[in-house]
Amino acid sequence: MIPMPDRVYLDNSATTAVAPEVLAAMRPYFDARYGNASSLHSFGREARQAVDESRAAMADALAARPEEIVFTSGATEADNLAILGSALARSGGGHILTSKIEHDAILRAVEWLKPMGFDVTLLDVDGTGRVAPGDVASAFRKDTFLVSIMAGNNEIGTREPIDEIGRLCHDRGVLFHTDAVQAVGKEMLSLENVDMLSASAHKLHGPKGVGFLYVRRGTRLAPLLHGGGHERGLRSGTENVPGIVGFAAALALAQAERVDVTSRMRRLRERLMTEVLKIPATRLNGHRAESLPHITNFSFAGIEGESLVMKLDEAGIAASTGSACSSPNLEPSHVLVAIGVPLSMAHGSLRISTGRDTTDADIDRLLEALPRVVAELRAMSPFKVGE
Ligand SMILES: Cc1ncc(COP(=O)(O)O)c(C=O)c1O
């Protein structure tokens, strides 16, 4: 790899650096304590203890019970387990309510269920990406059994009113799932009205390849993976012991630092909004205030987001257009389309997402490069941009 010491990383909603504290906590479970948590000998018992302690600490942090945490390979699996698992636990079909701006792990999972007799309603959002609780209430049907609305959007950062939506679901005896991947560790999340919640370690300075689904006691769920019956039969497969230990360490760190880190992130987001919107023909995608602290998304008329990302990369700045998962695909982002961004602008979007290590100096670098890069790309564009 070519060393590039001066690079600035502003793509923390795609993934984050593993924090040194997290790496240190994980390391022994790769070599000295490498047992299989199901083995009876001392190596196995050490691994089991690490998994149990991690689970207990995470449950405590979320005000959940340890047995309500089901470890998975990440949030894609957790989302699929929530959607498919609750659908497959039913005898007949039924109706699922979700929104147009969910992650593909939700949208593709509900789509997959349709030929099996399930109906799906994709709720609209407003121009800032908010789902109206009233829309959820009026879309309920007699056979609605599941609602899934994310806690905060991964592309535009908009926070959703999940407490209110969860309460509406519980009043009707409907299961409520939330994909809280981008919110865990950054927001105070209450599980009071939540039956299932998905999270992923690599979004909060933990390792890749580990996540969990919180499953409220008593929720009926069918497993998707069959085998040795791990995770109370809900997710077979040898536990990723270093990953689970790392996830617990990352969550503990995020909670300990939350107030400091998120207030810095909010301040940097304010700076970004003030300065970037000075660039002519630029818009903010998302909500100014009802937002996760680390994500800010802009559109620039007359340019392609991909070119912008490449030009910034040449300047040593890593940001993204839309979500990392859909970047190779040249369709405009389904989230930007859902909030009504005109097609000409939806193609020119840039997502900037900060992490625990992002500084003012990093934002200075971006603010120095961005107006220049946008102007250069516009000068090459066949479309004239009105100012
Ligand atoms: C909102 C949201 N849900 C789900 C996922 C998928 O998570 P994972 O990478 O752990 O599979 C992501 C990651 O991009 C995400 O941002």
Image: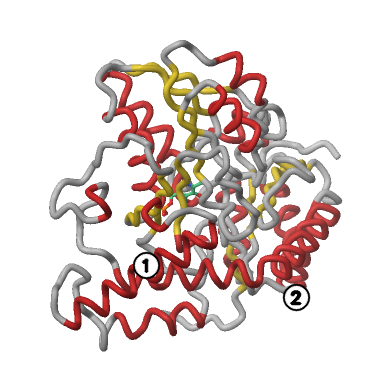
Q: What is the spatial separation of the Cα atoms under label 2 and label 1, in whole angstroms?
A: 33 Å
* Mark 2–mark 1 CB contact (< 8 Å): no
> Looking at the image, which residue is at 42% across and 36% down?
106
Most foreground residue, 319 or 292: 292
Q: Is residue 227 left or right of residue 334?
A: left
Determine whether the residue tagged by mark 2 lies in a helix, strand or loop.
helix
Q: Residues within 10 Å of mark 2 (few under 14, many from 20)?
A: few
Q: Which quadrant of the figure has residue 48?
A: bottom left
> Looking at the image, which residue is at 31% across and 17% down?
93
Coloration of the structure image: secondary structure
Q: Is residue 274 left or right of residue 297?
A: right
Name the mark on residue 244.
Answer: 1
Q: Quadrant of the N terminus?
A: bottom left
Most foreground residue, 351 or 57: 57
User: In the rendered image, which residue does mark 2 sit on?
Assistant: 361
Q: Quadrant of the C terminus?
A: top right
> Looking at the image, which residue is at 76% across and 67% down?
264
Q: Relative to 310, say whether 382 is above or below.
A: above
Q: Amino acid at mark 2?
A: Ala
Q: Amino acid at mark 1?
A: Ile
Q: Which quadrant of the figure has residue 314?
A: bottom right
Q: Percent x, y for residue 192?
A: 57, 42
Q: Percent x, y for residue 59?
A: 47, 59
Determine whether the residue tagged by mark 1 lies in a helix, strand or loop.
helix
